[in-house]
Image (spheres, rainbow, N blue to C red):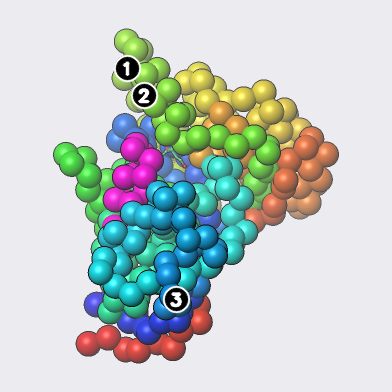
Amino acid sequence: MSDDAIPSAKLPLSARSPGKCIVFGEHAVVHGGPELLLALDLYTQVGVAVGPETRLNHDVDGRRSNPYFDRALDRFWRDRPAIDVSVVSRVPRSAGLGSSAAFVAALGAALASASGGMSRPELAQAAFDIERGAQGVGSPGDTAATIAGGCVTVNSDMGTILWQVEHAEESWTVRRVPDPNWVWVVGYSGIPRNTATAVLAVGRRLAQPDGPSLLARFAEVAESGIRAFVNEDPESVGAGMIRNQELLREVGVSHPRLEALLAAAEPVALGAKLTGAGAGGSVLVLPRPGREMEVVRRLARAGAAAYAVRSGSPGADLVSATRIPSG
Ligand code: MEV
């Protein structure tokens, strides 16, 4: 296993994994389009210990009420002793910031570690299988970003290959791109959204006769935006975000609250757009240099829970266990 693998360790242990935001390409990625994601410095942390019965945050019905938990146990913990799992998270739920992927990745890393360790590509495939199984639809972008950490692309030629994720006939290539280390602002509208509902609605929209040309525009905006990101050109990245938002509006996943947040940030932003599935959830803003806190204030005044965030956080890993070298 590579140095970067999730190492073997004994229970009790804790693992954590970051939330994510999408700079370019959400929704289109489900249909093969390119995407750019950043891991955020907001984490979900999972503690796992052997317990008298399997519980999730003290809930003995955790398996029934949480399909991600149920599927993760099926995948990583069949016929193993009962475990007590506790979760704390700074990633708001149903906000488009990858809370379910961060939970699955942190829990998967913990259980994989207690089962002898796992390579990161294997964990990425397993986490995607769990998320896709629980949601029924979607791409491996969110699980890839939380497991890889830093900045990653999916379905793009840009970056160095990390791994490939498969589902039935589909395949997505995940690549690492360098982190320009900018400060971003995320604003959660407070309107929870459902990823599967939004993905299915966009799928219906893209099945209309102009679907292929819309998808081509998504791809062109994302590819040129990713190039600008790699060239550390924030003005062009911001302009690309604005164009990406126009397309997201056109496929019907914006929301009046999101538009109000984007309008509030606009005077002090290089670019801004919704991030994640939309139809509620969050906006992502690239502030003009030196205006970061003003963006936070403007979004907060417009009613959002606003966070200044840095990209480039490390991906899924153990936090508190003694590392036992593998091999
Ligand atoms: C959700 O964070 C991003 C979507 O593109 C769905 C997916 O890629 O699974 C809307």
Name the amino acid type tagged 2. Answer: Gly
Say which mark, if any, is on residue 51: 3
Mark 1 packing: few (<14 Cα in 10 Å), some, or many (20+)?
A: few
Residue 217 picture location, percent across and down: 40, 25
Q: In which quarter of the image is ligand 1?
A: top left
Looking at the rendered structure, the secondary structure element under dot 2 is helix
Determine which of the numbered discs, if any, sits on residue 265 in the image.
Answer: none
Residue under label 1, please give it. Answer: 207
* Residue range (magenta): 126-138
* Of the two numbered discs 3 and 1 in the rendering, the one whose residue sits closer to the viewer: 3
Q: How far separated are the C-alphas under marks 3 and 1? A: 49 Å
267 w.r.t. 184: above or below: above
Q: What element carries label 3?
A: loop
The answer to whether residue 81 is above or below residue 27 is below
Cα–Cα gap, marks 2 and 1: 6 Å
The mark closer to the camera, 3 or 2, is 3
* Mark 2, other Cα within 10 Å: few <14 / some 14–19 / many ≥20: some
Q: What element carries label 1?
A: loop
Report how far apart the C-alphas of labels 3 and 2 lie in the structure: 43 Å
